[in-house]
Amino acid sequence: MAANKLPQGYFEYILAMDSETSGLFFDEHPARSLTNPDDRYQCVSWGMLVLNRQFDILDELYVEIQWDGKSKWSDEAAKVHGLTKEHLAANGLPFEDAYVQIANFIYKWWKDTPVATLGHNSISFDLPFLRSDLSEIGLKLKFGNRHLDSNTLGFTIFETYTSDQLFEALGQNARGDSHNALDDIKRTVEAFRVSRSIAKKVLG
């Protein structure tokens, strides 16, 4: 391959992302009921990182989002992320303002280039939520077909089933009782970084 020729499937940046939500549908689209479109959950926080191909962090965004008053609210989900309606009302951005900020953050790096993503179950969870919430205010971003999933990485290489198990297997400290979207995505990126380092040492 010529030195100036890019490999097939090349992408320059990776959007690493993690969300916390007001709940999810386990047997349908995670954000929206397929039988009753008026029934939906929303994201209440996002942690996003822009990475290069070496998994270095180039930019980051953390945003909390006010409950919109219409979406379903699961007390079980709230126990996981620890964000209450009252906290979000006082500290979160209004729904539309939050997603304008998120869209601008992504567009700054990708413009019209398809976005490659990284996360834990992000293809089946975070990405559908992001698209669903963006569509609520008429925004649509262009996502590609390159997605890095630490759930697959963990099960294939380390025989783990959850992100906590993967983080522990790679020597990370316990994250405590509640999940923070920005902290969690940084842990996920570190899991990829350490896994690549291990592979290089093994494969030479």
Image: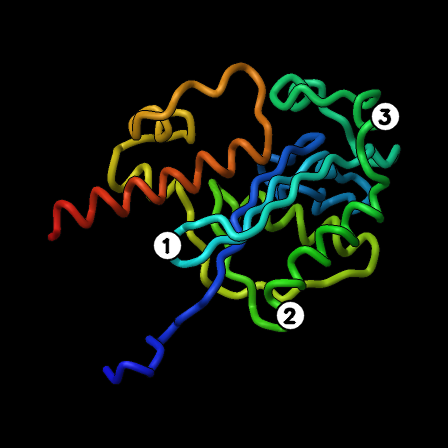
Q: Residue at x 84, y 47 (%)?
A: 97
Q: SS at mark 1?
A: loop
Whole-percent x, y for residue 83 in the image: 71, 22
Q: Residue at x 56, y 68 (%)?
A: 114
Give me the disc on residue 90.
3
Whole-percent x, y for residue 136 in the image: 81, 52
Give me the disc on residue 54.
1
Q: Is residue 3 above or below residue 28?
A: below
The residue most toward the right is: 69
Give me the disc on residue 111.
2
Q: Residue at x 64, y 70 (%)?
A: 111
**Marks 2 and 3, how far apart at CA:** 32 Å
Whole-percent x, y for residue 122 in the image: 52, 46
Query: Mark 3 is on which residue type?
Result: Ala
Q: Residue at x 41, y 29 (%)?
A: 162
Kindly check if marks 3 and 1 are in contact, taking CB atoms under 8 A apart as contact: no
